[in-house]
Amino acid sequence: MCCLVLVVCFGALAEARKKHCLLHAERGILVEDNVEQPSGLTFSHRTKRLYMICDTGHCNYIFEFDEEGEYIRKLEFTKDHKDVEAVACYDKEGLLYIGEESKRKVTAYYLPSDEEEIPYSSDSESSEEGEEGEGERLLTSVTGREISVVTGDKTEREIEKKTVELVEAFHFTVAAPEDSTLNNGLEGLTVNDRTGEIFCTNEKEPREIIRLSQLGEPIDIRYPAYAKDLSGLCYDNDLDLLWVLSDVSEAIYVTNVETGAVYDYWDLDMENPEGVALNNDHDPPLLYISTDPSSPQGAQYVAALFIFEKPTIGTGLGYQEKCDYDDNCVGCDEIKEEAKENQKAFDKAQEELEKEMEEEDKKKRESLGLLLGLPLAAVIVVAVLLLLSAVLVKRRHEFRRVFSCVKRSPTDFDGYELDDLGPLDADDADDNDDNDVWLEQSPGGPLPPDGDLCLGDAAVILTPGRPLDDDDDAALYA
């Protein structure tokens, strides 16, 4: 215990960093056939079993494994529990806790006994009376695993996996921080076997480790800064320490129960670690970590259970800059291959999604272009029509001008008069009086030599008050 004297400050550990001390597992086990999305994990020293929770919406079971990671059976709780993220054992009282993330509700169930007697009969029709293995048998400590029974004809029989209904003892709700969100709620859960005190975590925003009485009454709250999030907790009944797991940091920390000071920590060679448990009864002691395959942004990982030899304080990054553990994991290659296949499937799905989005964007752009093009085309058409209309009006005016002009010599205009000094029009007719005047086009100077004068030309009196005579010719043709 002398190694516990050293307390290391790890406030900067939450910063992004490379992994320098990978803690390699001894075994890796795929559990996806039984547990779709593993989350919390705990070990019972009373039953020598692991209990794993899943956090899918339709999952209302705790999954039981033996200490070697072999699946045994399901423990069923009522379906009104949603988003269950955490599980913990309190062996002294024989209780099994589950924690709901968004509701922040903790429910205690009685830990079921494993000792049962189930009648078992040989189904061999060919067995003759008196042959070995004939008749009914009793199997004690039924686990639901495949059990081979040698009968007279040496056939094998699979025992149906059992589902046990849990009985509730009590429940309570953990108060939420003011700035916490529903999806960053209750995540980790463990029980101090010595005192019965419960520890639970608020995953992030803010990161909290909350200590409660056995009945859920708050004792104190700590705000760890060494990890980016808090995904799992496990009380070490041998060292009286608290192991803290971080999903985002992909690391595990061993800390003081009372102060939260970090004694040591190790990087993990995995993604999405969410559940942690210890088995100090095994020789050597074992550390278990479960991984959740779900990923909101990247590729799906793998639903797996990793078994480690429990690391010793002083061998991690709290004491050295680098460390090198042997990577002799049995089953980890299979897990890594499946993770690679999941990555390939994710990349392919992303490519297909990007293509679909590009096609959708293309269609939207085409539709938008059509919507914008129609008004533009209409404007162009209207402009062209207006231009054509103006040209036609001009042409029509010129046409009328050509055919309304009077081809005459200057003297032929004797007899025309201008009314009110306005433009020449049909009212300026020949009335054969002595007040007829000669006209000049304005603007544009005098009338041209050919003497053309058209209706609509603006005119002024050249010699007002008398008819045109030879004295006005100079003014006319100047």
Image (cartoon, helix red, strand yellow):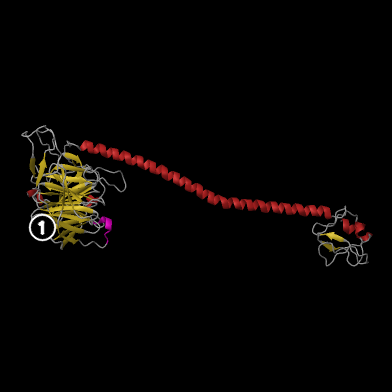
Position of residue 280 measured from the top left corner of the image (x, y, whole percent): 9, 46
Question: Magenta stretch?
Answer: 179-185
User: Quick check: 473 left or right of 80?
Assistant: right
- Residue 65 pos. (x, y %): 15, 45
Q: Which quadrant holds residue 211?
A: bottom left
Which amino acid is tagged 1? Gly
Q: Is residue 61 left or right of residue 413?
A: left
In the depicted view, which residue is nearer to us: 174 or 114? Answer: 114
Name of the residue lying farthest toward the front: 129
Q: According to the image, label 1 marks what residue?
A: 196
| Residue 362, placed above or below residue 478 | above
Left or right: where 280 falls relative to 250 = left
Secondary element type, mark 1: loop
Image quadrant in which you'd find residue 22 = top left
Residue drawn at x 19%, y 37% as measured from the top left: 331
In the rendered image, is residue 35 in sight? yes
